[in-house]
Image (cartoon, grey):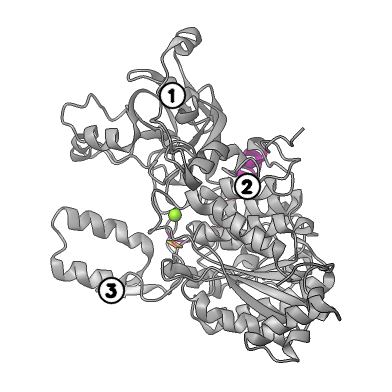
Amino acid sequence: MSQRGITGTGGALFSDDGQDGLMHRAFLRGGGASAEDVRRTPVIGIANSASDLNPCNKGLAHLVKEVKRGVRDAGGLPLEFPTISISEPFTRPTSLYLRNLMSIDVEEVISVSPIDGVVLMGGCDKTVPAQLMGAISANKPATMVVAGPRPVSCHRDNTSVTVDDAWPMCDRRRVGEVDDAEWLEFEGNLNTDVGTCNVMGTASTMAAIAELLGFALPGSAFAESTSATRREIAYQTGVAAVAAVKRGTAPRDLVTPGSLENAFRTVTALGGSTNAVIHLEAIAGRVGQMIGLDNFQEWSRSTPYLANLRPGGSETLPAIEAAGGVPSVLTRIQDLLHLDERTALGTSWAETLAAASDAPTPAIAERATPRAERGALVVLRGNLAPGGAILKTSGASDVALTAHRGRVIVFDGLDDLNARIDDPDLDVHADSILVLRGLGAVGAPGMPEVGHIPIPAKLHRQGVTDMVRISDARMSGTSTGTVALHVSPEAAVGGPLAYLRDGDEVILDAEAGVLAHCVDPEEFAARQPYRAAPGPTRGFASLHIRHVLQPEYGCDFDFLRDPGAPGAAPLPA
Ligand code: FES
Ligand code: MG
């Protein structure tokens, strides 16, 4: 088909009276649309990440019917398209490696297609930030419906099985407490339906962020994946997508300093995932902004931790859903929020919260009696992490470890770690600090969730369950321990971590926000640094290692950030 003469953009191409309109309508008619269908307006693309390779998002294949019904009932024409999907458990070496690629896919299809707006359908951890980043850069009106969590299930005498129950089960299997029959039974009981992880992990955290940034409907984060409520949310998101186009609300109107602060404070109140820091900074960069470590630190310090949800608390997601979801958390921290920011319905948060429930619930602590006075995410800085590091203090088992000085044992990558960690001759003590380097955004590549270094076997046998650990890697939202993560700059790009040696003294002080070594600066700088093995030389992996930024820039590619954002690639002269 000739592109000559195309003048319109978006859905206007379908109503063009000349050649362009004819050809656009004729091609859709060939796909089964009626003469009436092809004249509907606005045209709403539906970016669907349903995939057999991503069971968390698989339910979107059915949910999309409701979105289409909503778009049609509001007068629009829904046109679904597939996108890359990224599964946490299935993607090697790590799902973050593909987040930016998925964002490019989403951005470009939205940008080049004859659509006026888009509904994003994501769920599993990285798919939500990837879709948001892509849609923000494309800047056509965008709404989002997430896959929703899988139902809580049962296994023998445990009647509220969630994904984090897998770890103790694996530990029991390792020491011979689980026979083959129970192991097989548990495999069938852990996930009894499609949907995202049913705890306050990264997927739930990102679903909440999508609400606060004005893409997902208020209160939509936690309804179960195949519930009637989830189907109604999908339908209403289709309706809202048409309204967003009619209002002319574009993503750049939604992602503001105020909505970014609201989003992070909500993550803090929910006790959400450390990954949120990376994704929010990447999202900010797409509109030329940078949140910065000082803001993260200040917002975390001044926001109470309220949600009592697994894995950090005792309740499951249905409990917070029954209490009203994200808005019911927000009612308790209203004074900390920018209430004039917009929801996906075009209303202000002030209007939304006026109608939200603040009834007492075991899922959310009251403001007067928070689970912690300050948020669980602490920003660390110092001569070992000039670009920052993150510590989730709610994960630390012993408060003494969050103010600790000790000698380090350094592991260069996973092979070295696996070869030596359980060696009976390893010179390690309970107050040693374990360092794992070479696993940052460039080094791995993609910052795998391996920062949770196992306790050496000989200490484990002595009853040691937590030690200070430091890494340029990430850690799963379902893991715990005193682990300083996301150390920046990472070892593979010559950050200070690359110069550390066994026996060096290091200080971790969560209260003061410090991560520092005590080596003489001149001696330190004169050392031979750790050198990563040569990286890939072709394909996406090569593109990734040449352009991925450090965590304080959200691990986005330099050429994907808005040109006005710190860390963005310089414009051609
Ligand atoms: Fe997909 Fe947890 S593995 S949401
Ligand atoms: Mg995860």
Name which residue lies at 49% across and 31% down.
490
Q: Tell which circle, 3 or 1, labels the residue nearer the N-terminal end.
A: 3
Q: Please tell me whether mark 1 sits on a helix, a strand or a loop.
A: helix
Camera-side residue: 246 or 320?
246
Give the residues in magenta: 295-310
Name the amino acid type tagged 2. Answer: Ala
Q: Please state the horizontal and vertical placement of residue 272, each as a whole percent of the image.
A: 53, 54
Q: Tell which circle, 1 or 2, labels the residue nearer the N-terminal end.
A: 2
Camera-side residue: 492 or 428?
492
- Ligand 2 within 8 Å, label 1 CB: no
- Ligand 2 within 8 Å, label 2 CB: no
Quadrant that contains the C terminus: top right
The magenta stretch spans residue 133: no
Q: Which of marks 3 and 2 is in front?
A: 2
Q: Please state the horizontal and vertical placement of residue 541, each as a whole percent of the image.
A: 47, 44
The reply to whether residue 409 is visible in this rendering is: yes
Q: Please tell me whether mark 3 sits on a helix, a strand or a loop.
A: helix
Name the amino acid type tagged 1. Answer: Ala
Q: Tell which circle, 3 or 2, labels the residue nearer the N-terminal end.
A: 3
Q: Please tell me whether mark 2 sits on a helix, a strand or a loop.
A: helix
Q: Name the residue under label 2.
A: 282
Name the amino acid type tagged 3. Answer: Gly
Disc 3 and disc 1: Cα gap in Å? 44 Å
Residue 308: numbered disc: none
Camera-side residue: 233 or 29?
29
Q: Please state the horizontal and vertical placement of residue 434, each as a whole percent of the image.
A: 34, 31
Q: Please state the horizontal and vertical placement of residue 559, each as a whole percent of the image.
A: 65, 42
Residue 188: numbered disc: 3
